[in-house]
Amino acid sequence: MNPSASGWIPKFLTLVKKQHITGLVQDEIHFYKELKNVGFIYGISINTLPNKPLSKLSFTTAEYTKINLFHTLLFTFFIKYPKAQFEEAIDYIINFYKTIDKGKTGFFHKLSLTSSSSDNLERIISARIQESNTISKNNPSSTLTYTLLFLDILAFKKFLNTCNHLKTYTNEL
């Protein structure tokens, strides 16, 4: 599995079972501590949350961040909807990003070119971590961007509970 290549989300989902998304931690506080341990909270992911090898490749910080962001969005979704399927989670995540980025031209324009929800989500995640704008691995602005990704998780949790005033909520965060 290579998070920089197309099709990484379906491969990730075949490697990580649903019970590994939520079942390996006791609660949200423990999950948050695990996010800190892998560096996601600090904007410098040095490992992935699934406590198993995902690939024989060495991942970059951006690739670790992609995996951890996706895993955390799934965790948040399955805490709210434990009986749901991966496809539903992906659709909710896409709708969430469409909701918070409403009005931004160009961000979702390219999504209409693909037919797969997982392809769309891969593009959203890549755009969200601003992979194409990272000049170097030690770019301070990318570290700040990666640090702020946890705000996406907080907003997604709010989105799952109520869509009311989500734009206001994200602006206040």
Image (cartoon, helix red, strand yellow):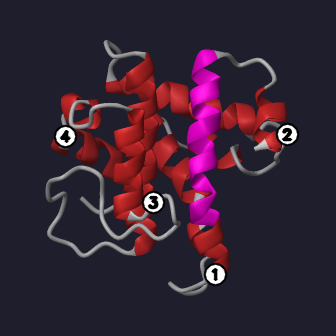
Mark pair 3, 2: CA separation: 28 Å
Q: Specify the amino acid type for callout 3.
A: Phe
| Residue 116 in view, yes or no | no
Q: Which residue is mark 4?
A: 14
Residue 89 position within the rendered picture, expressed as x and y whole percent measured from the top left: 43, 26
Mark pair 1, 2: CA separation: 28 Å
Q: Earlier in the sequence, mark 4 or mark 1?
A: 4
Q: Quadrant of residue 98?
A: top right
Of helix, strand and loop, which one carries label 4?
helix
Q: Is residue 84 above or below residue 61?
A: above
* Direction from residue 48 to residue 68 in the image, left or right: right
Whether label 3 touches label 2, CB < 8 Å: no
Residue 71 position within the rendered picture, expressed as x and y whole percent measured from the top left: 37, 44
Q: Which mark is residue 103?
A: 2
- Which mark lies nearer to you, 3 or 4? 3
Residue 92 position within the rendered picture, expressed as x and y whole percent measured from the top left: 53, 25
Q: Specify the amino acid type for callout 1.
A: Pro
| Residue 146 in view, yes or no | yes
Of helix, strand and loop, which one carries label 2?
loop
Residue at 21% across, 37% down: 24
Closer to the camera, 24 or 50?
24
